[in-house]
Image: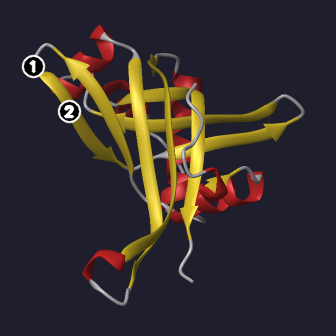
């Protein structure tokens, strides 16, 4: 993998990755299908595990079982992801010295549909815990039947931060 050009902005601290995952509300997924490239913003849940072997990240999303997104997932399991937060304009002394503060995570991985009810409940629970912490979580069998739940395992991801001075 190519190294980050502005390495001084690279995030390597697992605690900061955790903060970004908590603060962001949307992940953008990039795919290719027979119609071309496309990007879809979706809400998500996650499992982030920093351990002796590095950091592992899995994202969980849900949606309809049919449509362009579902077709693309079935045809090609490769996916790109991007999420960002802490947006703020950095004012400059002249027009081209303006910039933007942010934190972000970008990566590539593989997406797969979860088919077993216990896997789907696990993924949907992760989504609810991230999007609506403290909510009473219950899933009816008919909800599980008609909802597609996907897991994205990231093979490679990086974090980047531009701080306001």
Residue at 40% over, 72% down: 100
What quarter of the picture does the C terminus occupy? Answer: bottom right
Residue located farthest toward the bottom when viewing the structure as drawn: 93
Task: Return the x and y of residue 151 as percentages of the image width and height.
Answer: 50, 28
Between 118 and 149, the one nearer to me in the picture = 149
Name the residue beneath numbered marker 1: 35
Label 2: which secondary element: strand
In the picture provided, is 29 more to the left or to the right than 59?
left
Name the residue beneath numbered marker 2: 38
Task: Return the x and y of residue 119 as percentages of the image width and height.
Answer: 57, 25
Question: Residue 75, located in which quarter of the rendered image?
Answer: top left
Q: State whether residue 67 is above or below residue 77.
A: below
Q: Kindly check if marks 2 and 1 are in contact, taking CB atoms under 8 A apart as contact.
A: yes
Task: Return the x and y of residue 56 as percentages of the image width and height.
Answer: 70, 33
Q: Label 2 crowding class (10 Å Cα cut-off): few <14, some 14-19, many 20+?
A: some
Residue at 75% over, 51% down: 14
């Amino acid at each position: 993998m190519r190294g980050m050009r502005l390495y001084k902005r690279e995030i390597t601290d697992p605690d900061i990755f955790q903060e970004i995952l908590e603060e962001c509300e949307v992940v953008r997924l990039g795919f290719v299908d027979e119609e071309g490239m496309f990007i879809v913003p979706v809400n998500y849940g996650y499992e982030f595990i920093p351990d002796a072997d590095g950091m592992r990240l899995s994202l969980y999303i849900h949606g309809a079982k049919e449509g362009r997104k579902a077709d693309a997932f079935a045809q090609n399991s490769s996916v790109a992801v991007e999420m960002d937060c802490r947006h703020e304009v950095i004012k400059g002394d002249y027009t081209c010295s303006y910039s933007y503060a942010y934190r972000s995570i970008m990566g590539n991985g593989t997406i797969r549909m979860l088919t077993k009810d216990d896997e789907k409940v696990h993924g949907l629970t992760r989504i609810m815990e991230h999007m609506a912490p403290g909510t009473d979580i219950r899933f009816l069998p008919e909800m599980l039947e008609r909802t597609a739940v996907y897991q994205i395992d990231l093979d490679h991801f990086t974090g980047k931060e531009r701080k306001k001075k």
